[in-house]
Image (cartoon, rainbow, N blue to C red):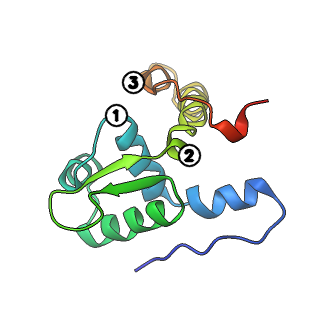
Amino acid sequence: MKTYTPSRSPCPIFRAARVLGDRWVLLILREAFFGAERFEDFIEPLGISRAALTSRLAILQEAGLMRRDPPEGKRARYVLTESGHDLAPLYREMADWGAQHLFEDGETSRDWGKSFPSAPRSKSAQP
């Protein structure tokens, strides 16, 4: 099982990549932005194994991007924290960039960029 080890690098991009640099993590967060909350909500659209999903959800919780509600027991919901919601602008930009640069002429993509909600700015990000 993968585990999350925070980086000691002085580079914020390196630290962010340590958490977000896994394709499953990126896609789990995408599904959370689209409303997935229950464990089963993530399985089908992603085609991810139960073991991989369990591992990545644990990483996202340890990194403070998602929380499990309630913390114990069955039928838990996995919800974005304020820190997780703060990633919405990054997801919109990533979706727009991918649509603009990674599709061939005539190929269509869903307008993912407009699908991500506006995230409230965290208190630490306020001037």
116 lies above or below 6? above
How far apart, in angstroms, are the residues tagged by discs 3 and 1?
A: 13 Å
116 lies above or below 85? above
117 lies above or below 87? above
Query: From the viewer's perspective, is the residue at label 1 or at label 2 nearer?
Result: 2
8 lies above or below 14? below
**Farthest bottom residue?**
1
> Quick one: 36 or 64, which is closer to the camera?
64
Q: Is residue 3 left or right of residue 43?
A: right
Mark 1 near mark 2, Cβ–Cβ under 8 Å? no
Q: Residue 107: in sight, yes or no? A: no
Q: Position of residue 41 (x, y in %)?
A: 21, 48
Residue under pointer 3:
110
> Quick one: 125 or 28, which is closer to the camera?
125
Residue under pointer 1:
34
Q: Which residue lies at the image location 76% right of the left edge and 72% below the top edge?
A: 8
> Is disc 2 placed on a helix, strand or loop?
helix
Query: From the viewer's perspective, is the residue at label 3 or at label 1 nearer?
Result: 1
> Is disc 3 placed on a helix, strand or loop?
loop
Q: Please, what is the three-letter code of the amino acid marked with disc 2?
A: Ser
Q: Based on the displayed image, in which of its 4 quarters is residue 10 positioned?
A: bottom right
Q: Please, what is the three-letter code of the amino acid marked with disc 1?
A: Phe
**Farthest left residue?**
74
Q: Which mark is residue 83?
A: 2
Q: Which residue lies at the image location 55% right of the left edge and 29% below the top edge?
A: 120
Q: Which residue lies at the image location 22% right of the left edge and 57% below the top edge?
A: 76
Tell me which numbered mark, 1 or 2, is placed earlier along the sequence. Answer: 1
Query: From the viewer's perspective, is the residue at label 2 or at label 3 nearer?
Result: 2
How far apart, in angstroms, are the residues tagged by discs 2 and 3?
A: 26 Å
Q: Quadrant of the N terminus?
A: bottom left
Q: Based on the displayed image, in which of its 4 quarters is residue 47 positioned?
A: bottom left
